[in-house]
Amino acid sequence: MDVEGLPPTQAVEELALEGEAAAGSGARGIPGRERADRVRTAIAYTVMFLVAALFAIPFLWTVSTSFRTLADTVAGFSLLPRHWTTSGYHEAFHTFNFGRYTLNSAIIAGAITLSNLVLASIGGYAFARLRFPGREVLFMLVLGTLMIPDQLRLVPIYLMLVNWIPAWVGHVGWHDASFVNRDGVILIQLVSATSLFLMRQYFLTIPRDLEEAAKLDAAGYFKTYRKVMLPLAGPALAAVGILTFQGTWNALFWPAVLLQDKSQYTIPIGIASFHFAYQTLWPPLMAASVLAIVPILLIFILFQRYFVAGVAAAGVKG
Amino acid sequence: MASVTYDHVTKTFGDTSAVKDFLLEITDGEFMVLVGPSGCGKSTALRMLAGLEKVSDGRILIGDRVVNNIAPQHRDIAMVFQSYALYPHMTVYDNLAFGLRNQKVAKSDIDTRVRRAADILDLGQLIKRKPKQLSGGQRQRVALGRAIVREPEAFLMDEPLSNLDAKLRVQTRAEILKLQQALGTTTIYVTHDQVEAMTMGDRIAVMKLGVLQQVGPPEELYREPRNLFVAGFIGSPAMNLVPVEVLDGAGGQGRVAGFRPEHVELASGGGNGIGFDARVEVVEYLGDEQLVHLTRKDTAIQAKLPVEEQIGSGQELKLAVPRDKLLLFDADTEERVTV
Ligand SMILES: Nc1ncnc2c1ncn2[C@@H]1O[C@H](COP(=O)(O)OP(=O)(O)OP(=O)(O)O)[C@@H](O)[C@H]1O
Ligand SMILES: [Mg+2]
């Protein structure tokens, strides 16, 4: 099969199909094997079921709790609510300003996702295809940042945001700028090493001939990127988009460190504030958690196909 | 349209030289084929002309303009890639129009040129399709179309037929020739297939290990190969190349005698050729002829003989090669010697 001539997405899909075909045709027609196969399938399904249950039960428990009354949550174990009520949801919105938190989360996650898509695709293309001195070293440095835990960077980053950057922009005449709160959270996550890596790996799989053809077709670097490479990078963009959005939407660490202004709290920070010193208000907390999952779920269902292809392709040539 | 000149061009990658002191003049409107075994530097030579590789030494001229330092898009050439390199996300129309749009050609102009090219190549029905909705042959035509719409000074083609099946290849070969003759555009065509080279080229340049061996029209390469390499490379089945000692009366010492299978005759009586006996090993039936594999003095020889003759393995045959069809080469220098 001439995978080379196909667009990468399609090539990946076709490879995947071939893999399935090969796996499926294994034992057919050999009688002794059939039972052994069935046993193996049964074991595999059991294991998968248990693993799935491990992930699903806490989630179902969350959903169930969100429909309980507060009294119900402390009245001993029951799988389903004893009294169904949506008051948890009401409370989440009215008492705890869940709408505001959602908006804040959306602004932060949206901005970071967008900037990751733009910057990682440009940067990934450069790392994959442009020749410039120090490219490999630079890329190693980028990957190296993955090995430094956020906790270790916390103090330096905080100092930079509070002292250095305001001082620098002060020099160019932008006084009284503040880079904590939302701006800080966005600024330090404009592009991640993971996004860059995913994009680079994907661009490496796109045949070089295409760029050369574009070059002869009088397209410069940027036009080649925008008109030829980017449209072919759909799966990688989907992967970067989903991973980034999901990661920042759920993130607790940087928002907890940097968000000082209560009006800028994101959902996870907001949810954390449902904990009171003497009592936790489980129903509204769980209601907020359920609502917070919805956008992620939607995005994943919509783009899952691309996502898998993108991660696969980045892995294939890794 | 323009001539193309390689003026002592060299290309080195690190410490390997892919093309060495390449000297070739391609006249305006000519169909020039670069042929040679894999890795001999054909693609590199072509890519330097396209501007996709830098020239290490020497000059390349298109017309009378030195293009060494001119960007690919300003060289006024169009290239057809072996992989076709069609943009997978664009329709056939956009594939053809992309280059013109980038050159800021007027919209109405683009439309006429794209439609004309589509017409010539019979792509009219397919204009709205994406490459993956096309057959191999159709993709190949789109690749040609993308070259045509540019209306360039020269076409550069790097093994454009190697992804097609045998039958389609023969058919497309003829179509490319017809197209080139109709447009009269200078064409440099790379292939490793000597049959393709022989059937298509006005002239053929044979390369080996980065060095140009011989340039000439097909008949000349066939009749008067300059050295052993060209003699063995051009022609199918390949020329018999045997030490002169195998052929009594061929003359000389330290020589290699060359003669083509199709020039071997059954010796019926005297004749003025060089006669020899040989034992039949295998006979291949080719339809109109038969290819007979023989041995003489432990040396393999092939002969193309008329099918009318009943020939079986193990048989001893009396054969002859006409004197004027026999070539002699120096065994050391591998150059042809004239007697
Ligand atoms: N980018 C490169 N870096 C290093 N060496 C290269 C590069 N491109 C080509 N070469 C070498 O130069 C030589 C000529 O390669 P080229 O691609 O021109 O061969 P070719 O005649 O087109 O062969 P084929 O028929 O297989 O396409 C080869 O030895 C190849 O390994
Ligand atoms: Mg080649």
Image (cartoon, rainbow, N blue to C red):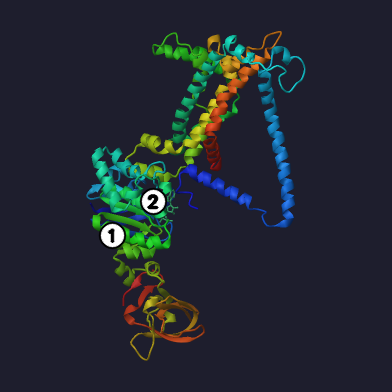
Query: Label 1 crowding class (10 Å Cα cut-off): few <14, some 14-19, many 20+?
Result: few
The circle drawn on residue B139 is 2
Residue drawn where x is 31% and y is 67% of the image? B218
Q: Position of residue A63 (x, y in %)?
A: 66, 22
Q: Is mark 2 within 8 Å of ligand 2?
A: no
Question: Depth check: B110 or B318 in front?
Answer: B110
Q: Position of residue B27 (x, y in %)?
A: 24, 57
Q: Quote the CA–CA distance across marks 2 and 1.
A: 18 Å
Q: Is residue A114 above or below residue B114?
A: above
The subunit carrying tag 1 is B
Q: Is residue B49 visible?
A: no
Q: Position of residue B46 (x, y in %)?
A: 35, 52
Q: Quadrant of the C terminus of chain B?
A: bottom left
Question: Depth check: B288 or A317 in front?
Answer: B288
Q: Is residue B95 above or below residue B190?
A: above
| Residue that lies at the very extreme toward the right in this rendered image | A76
Number of numbered callouts drawn: 2
In which quarter of the view is residue A32 placed? bottom right
- Identify the mark nearer the N-term, 2 or 1: 2
The circle drawn on residue B178 is 1
- Give, as a three-letter code, the residue at label 2: Arg
Element on which disc 2 rests: helix
Question: Depth check: B92 or A2 in front?
Answer: B92
The subunit carrying tag 2 is B
Q: Position of residue A133 (x, y in %)?
A: 44, 35
